[in-house]
Amino acid sequence: MSAASVTAAGAGAPIIMDGRRGPLGRLSDLFWRNPRLLLFLMLTPPMLWLGIVYVGSLFALLLQSFFSIDEFSGLIRYEFTLKTYGELFQPANLDVIVRTVTMAVAVTLSSAVIAFPIAYYAARYAQGKWKALFYLGVMLPLWSSYLVKVYAWKLILAKEGILNWLFAKLHLTWLLDAWLSLPIVGGNSLSFSYTGTFIVFVYVWMPFMILPLQAALERVPATLIEASNDLGAPPGQTFRRVIFPLALPGLIAGSIFTFSLTLGDYIIPQIIGTSRLFIGQAVYAHQGTAGNIPLAAAFTVVPVVVMGFYLWMAKRMGAFNAL
Amino acid sequence: MRFDRHYSGPFGLKLAAACGLLFLHLPILLIFVYAFTTEEKSYQWPPPGFTINWLMVTWNRPDVWQALGLSVRVAAISTVIALMLGTLCAAAVSRSRFFGREAISLLVILPIALPGIITGISLRSAFSIAEIPFSTWTIVLGHATFCVVIVYNNAVARFRRTSGSLIEASMDLGADGFQTFRYVILPNISTALLAGGMLAFALSFDEVIVTTFTAGQQQTLPIWMLEELVRPRQRPVTNVVAMVVVIVTFLPILAAFYLTRDGDQIAGAGK
């Protein structure tokens, strides 16, 4: 790279400088002349890592789902078959899938209902110091330890815990008992019922709904809402016809998190809930004690397919364009 | 409202927002109360009495220290790896447009977009196929993979705000690429990297879903807590550990918030 100095006529200063000296300088020049090389070198380490460690293992998993387990020996047979996927449609396994998806839908809807007022208030009314406080108020629970949050609910929902104490103090124990004696949502106690599982799921994943929703609401121009009011729409109508449609992309973005996280979780239903399995628990059980890795792998494909379908729907509804 | 800066919103909305925030915070506060209860056998409320005795008991527990040590080691190594890989990736993606750029951002985000159990079980099956024995490094492999995206998000947001003309000016003034990186780019992105690193540390320190698949017999602090949740041995010690974990994760989050709050994208908006 020892380009000769070209000197402008009549002036002493070189227009094109000499190449840099030293190995580092030459390397720097090389990168400047070949930006593609620098790009390639920059991308190689992260792509190697993600490609080998992550995508490689994902493929290893996918591959295993096409194997099957020999019923007699309990060993994995390494030949291509769709038999394992067929097993997913057995009533017991189908039950697990339906239960998990239903729970994910319920959790997503309730999260949206609880998150909306917080996001709306933070986006439209909170200002200055209050805005920062709201932001931290959502961020801290979002980032605080997942297990600690689950543990806190174990304390709350325990028979001798604060919630039962509260119901007793308010003389409402009969109400709780009536709820627990209901068929599906009930159970022996709150920490051994779908109600308990549901509450903890909503608590743990709801913060993921607030921030995208708030971002979407902040982009709704206040003038639109004023215009709607001026044209005589009562608040309810303004909400239905103006605010809600404009906030929908944020709502869908948030629901992707709550839905996906509920689909894949296996710790919450294990600690607070009934003995009936969710997808995550089924995966865990099949790969662990049962040693049926093909079925576990096939089970993990279910959330991926459901999420793929969900994202496709979200895209069709324009959630990504508006974000 | 535009026309009335002091109108603080309808009462119903305020009430609903306040209740929502209380719902988010009261359970965590409860952890702090339980850490000082004298009750040993159950989760009795209200606590019969308060003591700081359990802080000392926890302090003298070697298994807690071991788990904490492993967690800190794993989080530190994963953070360093994620900082390097995430910054490289962010720099490449934000500097130039090239074929496959979208695919690369998708690939980086995928480890946290897909449920953690998928990452966990795929890593585990890959380890068993490649016959890699479980060690600190198998945990790090998993953690660094999903920590990259945290650093990446923070760095990309900052690179977007950093003007390219600064880099050109530095080069015009005769600095080579490495000097430009050292004296121009690095100071510009340093707070974003620090924030990203802290968040990555907090994420790794707290991770349990992927870790159960990649740890084998080793115990990180979250795995220790999970054990205690499934088969409680000494509840007061668990209470104290839970409180410590809350404090340890809050500090980096607060620091990351203050480091990036003036920017267009505040750190931690996505986990």
Image (tube, rainbow, N blue to C red):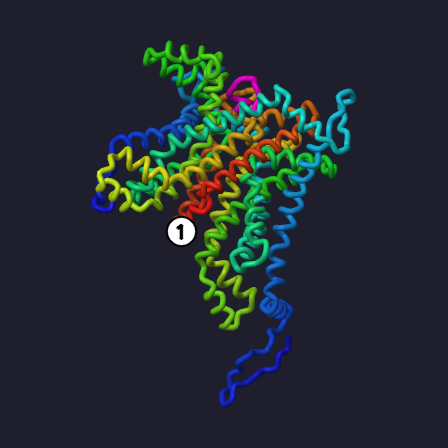
Q: Which residue is painted at 46% across and 56% down in the image?
A: B160
**Which residue is denoted by mark 1 in the rendering?**
B264
Main SS category, magenta section: loop
Q: Quadrant of the N terminus of chain B?
A: top left
Please state the total of marks drawn on the protein image.
1
From this view, report whether residue B222 is shown above or below residue A24. above
Q: Quadrant of residue A64?
A: top right
Check disc 1 and give the amino acid type: Asp
Q: Is residue B43 left or right of residue B72?
A: left
Q: Quadrant of residue B121?
A: top right
- The foreground one among A190 and B144 is A190
**Label 1 crowd bin: few (<14), some (14–19), many (20+), radius 10 Å:** few
From this view, report whether residue A43 is shown above or below residue A128. below
- Residue A313: percent from the left, percent from the top? 50, 38
Say which chain tag 1 marks.
B
- The foreground one among A319 and B57 is A319
| SS assignment at label 1 | loop
Q: Which residue is painted at 65% across and 40% down in the image?
A: B137
Residue farthest to the bottom, as pictured: A10
Q: Which residue is painted at 28% across and 33% down in the image?
A: A236
**Residue B23 in view (yes/no):** yes
- Residue B198: percent from the left, percent from the top? 49, 44
**Residue B66 in view (yes/no):** no
Magenta part of the chain = A269-278
Q: Is residue B54 left or right of residue B138?
A: left
- The foreground one among A255 and B232 is A255
- Residue A6: percent from the left, percent from the top? 57, 83
From this view, report whether residue A210 is shown above or below residue B57. below
- Residue B152: percent from the left, percent from the top? 52, 49
Q: Is residue A288 left or right of residue B27?
A: right
